[in-house]
Amino acid sequence: MMHEHEKTLLARAKAHGAADAAVIEASKVPLRREFLAACERNSCGKYGRCWTCPPDIGSIDDLMESLKKYKWAFAYQSVWQLEDSYDIEGMQDGAVGHNKLCQALTAEISKTVPGPILRLGAGGCQLCDKCAKVFDKPCVHPEEAIVSLEAYGIAVSELSEVCGMKYINGQNTVTYFGVFFY
């Protein structure tokens, strides 16, 4: 049975532009330690160059363990249309749009859900053009910075199945996910 705050969250997520959203038990979020290897290979170019990415956010084992203190996970996705499958600029624009959605939902969640909240988003934080880490300076936006799902070992493709969402939403689209733990 869905609680009133869950209905509110789902409705607000859609109102802010989420393509889909779901509330699941936090214990059902699939975790895979293997994601650390992708980070260590620097697949996205942010390893050691972003305050919200490994190795600067702590060990993946500690991060995965920290998720156990939460009872619920509010997962959401945004889907962005691309000109073609090589539209890198469109993918980047979608990532920026997804981060804006994450910020809007943060305000909604804070008003709706009691207790501590952990916000995770798609890929490394993209609030700044270049993270202050590359200049050996502290984070400029520590309260708004977004840590990636993968940095916590979350298997996003499996998470989409658990939540009843599509991981791939058609040709010439890019799909981003985010989760709030509470």
Image (tube, rainbow, N blue to C red):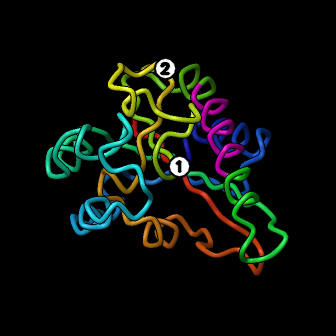
Report the number of numbered marks: 2
Give 99 or 130, whichever is nearer the viewer: 130
Residue 152 higher or lower than 6, as above or below: below
Q: Write the start and end of the magenta stretch as one range.
A: 95-106
Give 58 or 9, whichever is nearer the viewer: 58
Q: Position of residue 156 (x, y in %)?
A: 45, 65
Placement of the C terminus among the 4 image quadrants: top left
Q: Are marks 1 and 2 in contact (CB under 8 Å)?
A: no
The kind of residue on which mark 2 rests is His
Determine which quarter of the picture holds residue 139: top left
**Residue 99 on the magenta segment:** yes
Secondary structure of residue under mark 2: loop
Q: Position of residue 143 (x, y in %)?
A: 45, 19
Left or right of 108, for residue 87: right
Label 1 vs 2, first from the N-terminus: 2
Residue at left offset 49%, top offset 20%: 141
Left or right of 83, for residue 169: left
**Residue 18 on the magenta segment:** no
Q: Position of residue 68 (x, y in %)?
A: 22, 45
Q: Residue furthest right?
A: 83
Determine which quarter of the picture holds residue 20: bottom right
Residue at left offset 76%, top offset 81%: 171
Q: Which residue is mark 2?
A: 141
Query: Callout 2 environment at 10 Å: few (<14), some (14 to 19), or many (20+)?
Result: few
Q: Which residue is mark 1?
A: 178
